[in-house]
Image (tube, helix red, strand yellow):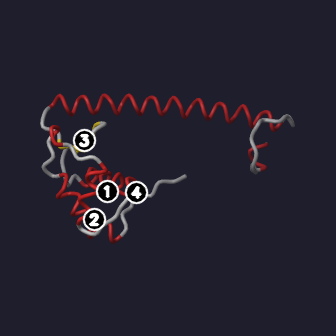
Amino acid sequence: MENNWELTNHERQVIYPLVVQILSHRAKEKVFSNTKIRKILLEFGEEITDTQIRKIVYNIRKNEDIALLLANNEGYFVASTIEEVNAWILTHQGKIEAMKSTLVHIQEQYEQRKHKLKQGEDCGLTGQISIFDLL
């Protein structure tokens, strides 16, 4: 499944500026969760999903419209200390390493299953496979 991080015209022109206003002055003590953001946007007549919020936040960070916009398990906030930024970076580096490791293990398991298919054995998977995967 491919993620589409591009904003629609409506997201870019209407929702994006609202989310920038909502999050611009959030300190760590006053985080805004996706639920809070959705409730505020609903007051403006905009009903959006958590996925849309993540996509908008991704674009806010990429465009640097709010510098050091971070998040923790409670919600989004703008970092005000070096320690907050360093902790966020370390946490995300750890998550990325864990995801890389998981990806490698799943790829290895898939290759093992494809090998079983090549041998004519039941590998426990259903569906179609490319002829090129069997070569």
Element type at marker 1? helix
Expressed as whole percent of the image width and height from the top left, the position of residue 56 reads 31, 56
Q: Which mark is residue 56?
A: 1
Q: What element does badge 3 sit on?
A: strand
Where is residue 105 shown, x and y percent of the image? 59, 29
Which is more foreground, mark 4 or mark 1? 1
Quadrant in the rendering for residue 88 = top left
Q: Earlier in the sequence, mark 2 or mark 4?
A: 4
Q: Say if mark 1 contacts mark 2, CB within 8 Å.
A: yes
Question: Dots 2 and 3: beta carbons under 8 Å?
Answer: no
Horizontal and vertical percent for residue 13?
27, 70
Q: Which residue is mark 2?
A: 15
Which mark sits nearer the N-terminus, 1 or 2?
2
**Numbered mark located on residue 5 in the image:** 4
Q: Nearer the viewer, mark 2 or mark 4?
A: 2
Q: Residues within 10 Å of mark 3 (few under 14, many from 20)?
A: many
Q: Which mark is residue 134?
A: none
Mark 2 vs 3, N-terminal side = 2
Q: In the current view of this chain or complex, which residue is farthest to the right? A: 120
Left of 11 or right of it: where is 122? right
- Residue at disc 2, secondary structure: helix
Task: State how far apart marks 2 and 3 are (Cα).
Answer: 19 Å
Marks 3/1: CA–CA distance: 13 Å
- Label 4, label 1: how far apart the Cα atoms are: 8 Å
Which amino acid, by three-letter code, is at mark 3? Leu
